[in-house]
Image (cartoon, helix red, strand yellow):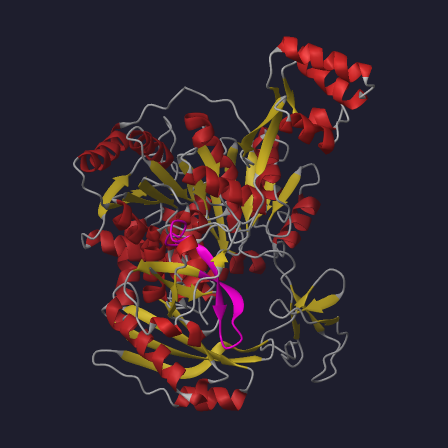
Amino acid sequence: MYADIIVDISHDKLDKTFQYQVPAALAERLVVGMQVNVPFGRGNRLITGYIVNLTDTAEFDTARMKEIHSVAEGKVPIGSRMIRLASFIRANYGGSMNQALKTVIPVKESVKAREKKSIHLNIPKEEAKQLLSEFEKKHAAARARLMKSLIEEEIIEYELVTGKLNISGVVLRYFEEQGFIRTEREELYRNPVKEQEREELRKTLNQEQRYITDCILDDYGRGVYKTYLIKGITGSGKTEVYLSVIEAVLSQGKQAIVLIPEISLTFQTVMRFYKRFGDVVAIMHSRLSKGERYDQFERAKKGLIQIMIGPRSALFTPFPNLGLIVIDEEHEGAYKSENVPRYHAVGVAKELAALCNASVILGSATPSVDSYYRALRGEYRLLTLNERAAVDAALPDVTVVDLKEELKNGNRSIFSRKLQELIKDRLRKKQQTMLFINRRGYFGLISCRSCGHVIKCPHCDISLTSHKNNRLVCHYCGYTTAMVQTCPQCGSKYISALRGGTQMVEEAAVRAFPEAKILRMDTDTTKGKDGHEKILAAFAAGEADILVGTQMIVKGHDYANVTLVGILAADISLHAGDYRAAERTFQLLTQAAGRAGRGSERGEVVIQAYDTENFAIETAAKQDYDEFYNQEILYRTLLDYPPVSNMLLVKFSSRYEERLIKAVNTVKITKENVTIIGPCDAALYKADDIFNKVLYYKAEAYETLTGIKDELEQFAKDNDDFQYVSVQFDFNPMNAY
């Protein structure tokens, strides 16, 4: 037998399989996906690799073929399904096979399993009493102490034996060798979900929810597995639909994966699922300990859980019989990986579902333009929820405030007069308010008001940010320096920071509303393992009147007492410099507005902006997705942007600027009906002393772009000019480069 192995070396030139002979001693043990140790190179140094195929056909002379040395003990094997999924990711998103394999393996580290041990009396009690008498006569105190305890209690926990009874390993080995006792082991699993009481009370589905549930389950019952897009306004009860469909899938002995875009949503989502399904629910995300991640992986493989909830990485849970994948808030950019390979969870979920005969449900109040475009073309089945699920719950009243007019009228506060009045009203009524701004911390652009000079990082082509400790920091490479007092360009003393962010909003709110209890939620305040959970639990319990936060507070959270949402500087994201800016702005504003009035009281929303006539702001204020989509897709069609066309971004990077320029200029790969833009400097041309250039390809067919990717990869491997230049690919990029 022979094994095709991907060696665990991150090097482009080794992105291929190497064949090894399988020694007879390992023939019974080896399976596809297992990690093994193999001799590599002239020195035959031992390195690890992944078995991607087992065959009885040798690819070259077996006399020259090396043997697998051993199995990499303690490592987690991956199934052949995940190998195929990794191959799909490699082919469709770029990167090496090694990088793709490491993406689909939820647990990278070897973690020691936890176990509970107990000591059992293995002989009749009469015989034990005789032995006790002998031990006492011989003054064998430890042996007598253990035997006496086992006569009183035939099963004792191992920790009690070695701890409280103070019995040494020598005594325990003697007892086992003589057959007096036996040690039993029970595997324990770390469960990051704190146990909650289950609630059998279920919400009755309304007519819209029941129709959607029946549509999906009718297809499922006939063995028809589709991708469904549920477009439901905020508060329309999409989660209740998910719960009902999942319950039916679980009843058939299958499992479900539920993706949510951020860790901040995990707490509330898990509680709803746990109360419905109990301890068959687990979570997977980056803030779990290594041991917790390992145990969730093992529990899933052994069928001890049936539902996995988590962000993008939860998609790779090794369920033996996966039946359903739900992607909630499917429009979120968090579903696109920022690391190589830059895969999108929706695309990978559809491929995984095809491998498993599973269905995919995408849900959002503001579907991505891409998903809605596909649904209208018939690639997905479109299902809609147009009413809020709660009785008498209506969409909130929205007011758009022009900040230019506020300034003209002498209001220099970050809160408009309208918003200030409404916050005071809510404080009087003991109702809660959310204040949302799409920046965190002290956003400090240091600029000179005399000459316009901006203080930049000497290593990166971006501005430094001022922090409260009187330091300037580069958020790309970490460079730090003292705050400048005069402009280095013209010597003017009129140099200061342009401020705006969650900390500033929090401090302004403290000054404006001293009687209010205020919480802030952003990446700075949620760094701890349970940071999100503590803040959200405190706000849900009514321990704060106002919650200030970034976009993590506007996604999916449901608080009945929140009747006011204030959106500050709503048009910031319109100037992000990429073609999705209007889409992102519309989605954020609509989602933020949707947090208000989810209980019995009608909600109000105040949107503050300078560019109040922008169609994204106007349609978000009306909560009119279709009007927004119709304008946005026209813009995308005119400019040939995704989803009407597909786009491939190729990023070239090097520490040597001259080598980078020379290498990029040698690229001559062209095809018919393909538009090429560039090469040009990246938006961040120099970062951490690395220079970057970009090249864009546009084509209607995605396969055309994957073909260009393959050609470019081979071109770079064969061309010496690329020896010190890295090449990365991003299909339909979510961010500007």
Q: Compare residues 248 and 734 and report the one nearer the observer.
A: 248
Q: In the displayed image of the protein, which residue is found farthest to the left?
A: 222
Judge whether residue 30 is colored magenta: yes
- Position of 329 with respect to 370 (left or right) is right
Coordinates of residue 463 in the picture (x, y in percent): 61, 73
Task: For the N terminus, give its image quadrant.
Answer: bottom left
Q: Compare residues 175 and 459 and report the one nearer the observer.
A: 175
Give the vertical position of 412 relative to 122 (above or below): below
Coordinates of residue 79 in the picture (x, y in percent): 37, 50
Give the vertical position of 628 relative to 4 (above or below): above
Q: Which residue is drawn at 44% across and 64% down?
A: 99
Give the vertical position of 673 relative to 37 (above or below): below
Magenta segment, which residues?
26-49
Give the vertical position of 637 relative to 167 (above or below): below
Coordinates of residue 109 in the picture (x, y in percent): 55, 52
Q: Which residue is drawn at 27% across and 43% down?
A: 358
Q: Is residue 681 in view?
A: yes
Q: Residue at x 56, y 36 (%)?
A: 190
Q: Residue at x 24, y 55 (%)?
A: 374
Coordinates of residue 97 in the picture (x, y in percent): 40, 65
Q: Is residue 602 in view?
A: no
Q: In which quarter of the image is residue 699?
A: bottom left
Judge whether residue 497 is colored magenta: no
